[in-house]
Image (cartoon, rainbow, N blue to C red):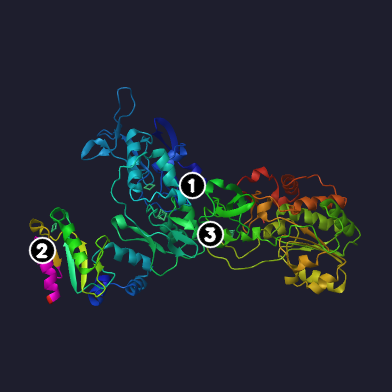
Amino acid sequence: MFLHALQEHFGFISKDAVEWTASKLGLQPINVHELVTFYPMFRQEPLGRHQIKVCRTLSCALAGAHQVRTFFCKRVGLDPHKHGPQTTSDGHYTVEFVECLASCGTAPVVMVNETFHEQVTVEKAEQILAGCRAT
Amino acid sequence: MPLAATLVEKIRIQIDGRDVEVPKMMPDWQGKLQPTTMLQACQQAGVEIPHYCYHPKLPIAGNCRMCLVEFGTPMMGPDRKPILNEDGTPKIAKSVLPYEPGTPRGAIGCATAISPGMEIYPNSPATKQMREAVLESLLINHPLDCPICDQAGECKLQEYSMQHGQATSRFVEAKVHKPKQVDLGPRIMLDDERCILCSRCVRFTRDIAGDDALGFVNRGSYNTLAAFPGREFDNNYTLNTVDICPVGALTSKDFRFQMRVWFLRETKSLCTSCGTGCNVVVSSREEKVYRLEPRENDAVNSSWMCDAGRLNYKWIGREDRLTRLGGSRLKACTWTGGAREVAEGLRTARPGTVAIIASARQTNEELYWLKKIATRLGAESDSIPRVGEGDRLLVSADKNPNSNGARLTGICGPLLGMKLAGIADGIRSGSIRTLIVFGEDVTRHGISAEMLQRLDLLVVSDILPNQTTRLAHYLLPGCAPAEKMGSFVNVNGRLQKFLKALEPREDARPEIEFLMELLGLLGAPQPARSVEGSFNQMAKEIPALAGLTWSSLGDTGATVQI
Ligand code: SF4
Ligand code: SF4
Ligand code: FES
Ligand code: FES
């Protein structure tokens, strides 16, 4: 609850927030840090303005999710070989893999902020980025 | 073992087809009695079950799965009576997967309690297969950098791979990479790729050292041992994690890349940095100490030692060690000649004009002979107290390793240093003309250099130079504890012996040798010829040591009444 509230307020959970939480709970910061790093929904860094979530669970993986993520990474200047969420230095984009977005029938699926994109091909991905640039 | 443990009920089980009786309950990491586990039962029967995360002195975590074994339990009828085979033996239900009764299902030996009639199969094909699978999974992302790993030669991953693993790898995918050379704290370096996530270090620092500093971050393949970013792993016990880490993940910055472990010679010894006297193993090669590690002794230090004591060995190799017979009056150039000159000087001293100051860092045997010399010369004697800070785990506030030995041998009274002021006065007034000093710089304890210069005779033995050794008429170079053998009595009355790891340097000799020689030259009968003999003779004379012999001390010593 604490951590969710902190994340909602600040957009991410900073090192200071972890230490503060730990002191409130009578724990050592490492205990809270373990938890924050365990759950992908807890963010340790501020996210980009456009948060591109590519599903990599089975259906999407089979339908080309990896190519889609690689495409996004390359186009916005991120390292496709790196693990975990990455954000561009200008703070525009965050690209990451997520687990099933519950639209397996229309794989591969991508969510940009709250908008859903289905059957994403490389061409479609290009359009999505164009849309992001326009806003 | 506590008395209760020897009285507990035994139960019969079968291990590898062999009937054994093992205690129903055994001490856990805190010494409390708990139901005996399969792993403990096998240990009792002399069968080793491979394990990583289990450590007898830490709470059980059961996370590595290395200790999986196949087992079976007697089948029970509806009447709760065992169902028997035709030959009258009980029918055994082997553990199997519930949804796949043909497949054996192991249980972790470290956390599964035994029950009467249980059968454990530590060498069955199913058990072997489980071990192979666990090892294979542990090695998937392991960097296999044994050639440059400090743990190589004493690594459980290597040992178990050899005993229980497969010769070839089936893994063709890319390995996951994790942080390497992580500077965890001032004394510890971590290689996360080597870590097998057993959590021994996490539990040690949380449950034993009381510093909840380590944990696992991220998850899945990227699970990583870490301290909180920006916080140092720095308490006085951190190096114990290096000892208990079953692999080469945690390394000591001090020992890192210094020596391949298989070249090291190990000697059972004691830490001399405080009055606790933690049992240690000294690892040396070619007369150089490379590391100290704790040696288990439940009456003293369990399996641990403090970092400060562990790293306090470098002075042994100092360049300025006293290694030459010396002193301003020495004429001879051999020990025999030197001892004769000293004896000559002492013989002419009038009784009552001699004082002896002997450090409580000297061994019992040395102090015993020094006391004999004191009696013979009618000399006053004392030791010097050394007080510092203690902690709640091991470190004692008494920084002398042998204050109790000094008391027992009578070289000092119940309070160390009570007679120092009197001795100083005696020197000042001229009533004390001869001073014998063993292992202390008395100029820092109320007897100034100027006072020392007034003496007729100043005989000093030490290992490092100081103001007192510089003024000595006769300077007798002695040995660091690692260079001799002897015994100490710790703050709780534990009498323990230590053995010699290194040869003395150049002229230096174990003090006991020249003390016995000197005593002989002074005309005293001296039947003992060795450290062992000295101890045995001393034990006959000092009531608190009655009945003890050098050999009866064993590796872990005996407790005596102080
Ligand atoms: S660093 Fe060593 S002791 Fe700690 S979890 Fe990893 S393997 Fe276990
Ligand atoms: S507690 Fe004392 S005896 Fe034990 S290792 Fe530390 S200094 Fe040495
Ligand atoms: S697998 Fe991608 S939405 Fe379910
Ligand atoms: S020793 Fe690790 S699970 Fe038993």
Was residue B442 drawn as part of the magenta stretch in this picture? no
Chain letter for mark 2, please: A
Choose top left, top right, bottom left or bottom right for residue A2: bottom left
* Residue extent of the magenta highlight: A112-133
Chain letter for mark 1, please: B
Residue where numbered disc 1 is placed:
B154
Looking at the image, residue B109 sits to the left or right of residue B516; the answer is left
Say few, some or many: other residues with alpha carbon within 10 Å of mark 2 (under 14 / 14 to 19 / 20 or more): few
Residue B561 visible in the current orientation:
no
Viewport quadrant of the N terminus of chain A: bottom left
Say few, some or many: other residues with alpha carbon within 10 Å of mark 1 (under 14 / 14 to 19 / 20 or more): some
Mark seen at residue A123: 2
Which is nearer the eye, B277 or A109? A109
Between the C-alphas of marks 2 and 1, the distance is 56 Å
Q: Is residue B476 above or below residue B46?
A: below
Which amino acid is tagged 1?
A: Glu
Chain letter for mark 3, please: B
Q: Percent position (x, y) of residue B479?
A: 71, 55
Which amino acid is tagged 2?
A: Glu
Residue where numbered disc 3 is placed:
B254
Q: Nearer the viewer, mark 2 or mark 1?
A: 2
Query: What's the residue at 21%, 38% (across, down)?
Result: B100
Mark seen at residue A62: none
Query: What's the residue at 14%, 70% (across, down)?
Result: A129
Q: Percent position (x, y) of residue B5?
A: 49, 45
Q: Are marks 2 and 1 on the same chain?
A: no
Answer yes or no: disc 1 within 8 Å of ligand 1: no
